[in-house]
Image (cartoon, rainbow, N blue to C red):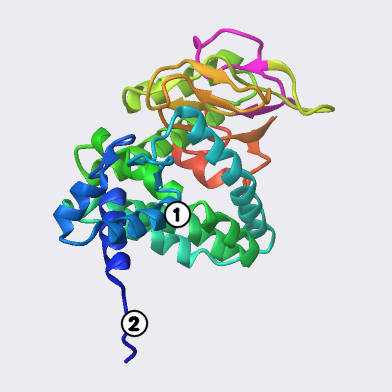
Amino acid sequence: MMIQAVSVADAVADELRHRLLAGHYRGGEQLRDTELSAEFGVARPTVRAAVQMLVADGLLVRGRGRSAEVRSFTAEDAVDLYRLRRPIEETAVSMVIAERRGLDGVQSSVDAFTGMAEGVSWDLVADHDIAFHRAVLVAAGSPRLLRTFDEAGAELRLLIAQLRPAYASVSELAAEHASLLQACENALWQGLAQAQAGHRLGDISHAVEASVRGAGRYGVVEEYTGHGIGTAMHMDPPVPNYGRAGRGPRLRPGMALAIEPMVMLGGEETVLLEDGWTVITADGSWAAHFEHTVAITDDGPWVLTAEDGGTSRLEMLTGGIGDT
């Protein structure tokens, strides 16, 4: 067994790191050398060395001649981290799908996250959250993607830690995300089940909205919709995620529609960022987006983006693809 020597400064840094990632300190809170020195019973130069380690990790910030402060995050900071993560994780997911890589590690990380006991330290919540995303990158098999993701790991953990006051328990956090995803996916399939020749476009929109509203107090995005698809990616008719049954154009065999519910935990307002592409929720709440493209046939809906045409899932809802 190897015994690794740890300096006093390392030990102080480890304890402060644990507290930061467990959400014990608020964003912007000052950590004064004199107070930390007295609390830990160590010299101030030792505290300063420990603090400097955490500044290098991006967990604390410190100006010349000033006390260290806990790194705080604005909505724009969170979006900026998303800009970094998005291409990395999208590439990893594409690699997993294209190369049909195993997902055992991803499933294990999900099980570990959702199975956390109540009362665990919040830093473990952050660890399990990050572990899920790392598992996807590990499954992709790209060490460079994983290394790039890990470079932002400390900031991501701290951001998660600062969400602690918003949740009464660990299970509430996991359940909130799982329920949001389930509500959005269920709404998608309810809409797909209505993509029948002879139905009207409003039947799809109404089914999506009714499913979301019935699942809980979720917001339905109204500014962005599904759409027709054919000789171009985006074509008429628009397919809103809300509406009245029996209204709108009649659906005919040969039509193809992209149905894409967008569901939010908070309000329904969104903000388009300066890049002209990225959309975020106006209140900073979590959102989910599922999409499938469906062809309307004489025999019922055929989901072009599902491996079995959506047959198994649709039969669960309708009792048969052609049933209305």
171 horizontally vs 308: left or right: left
The quadrant in which the N terminus is found is bottom left
Closer to the camera in the image, 119 or 8: 8
Q: Is residue 65 above or below residue 49?
A: above
Q: Residues within 10 Å of mark 1 (few under 14, many from 20)?
A: some
Tag 2's secondary structure?
Answer: loop
Q: Measured from the top left, where is residue 35 in percent x and y?
A: 19, 47
Q: Which mark is residue 3?
A: none
Residue beneath the point at 19% across and 37% down: 168
Q: Measured from the top left, where is residue 11 in percent x and y?
A: 27, 66
Q: Is 204 covered by the magenta stretch?
A: no
Q: Measured from the top left, where is residue 87 in percent x and y?
A: 64, 46
Mark 1 / mark 2, whichever is N-terminal: 2
Quarter occupied by residue 5: bottom left
Quarter occupied by residue 279: top right
Q: Residues within 10 Å of mark 2 (few under 14, many from 20)?
A: few
* Stretch in magenta: 238-259
Residue most extreme to the bottom = 1
Q: Which residue is mark 2?
A: 4
Residue most extreme to the right = 231
Residue beneath the point at 51% across and 63% down: 103
Q: Is residue 97 above or below residue 159?
A: below
Q: Which residue is mark 1?
A: 57
Give the Cα distance between marks 1 and 2: 21 Å
72 horizontally vs 144: left or right: left
Q: Is 256 covered by the magenta stretch?
A: yes
Amino acid under disc 1: Asp
Amino acid under disc 2: Gln
33 horizontally vs 247: left or right: left
183 horizontally vs 276: left or right: left
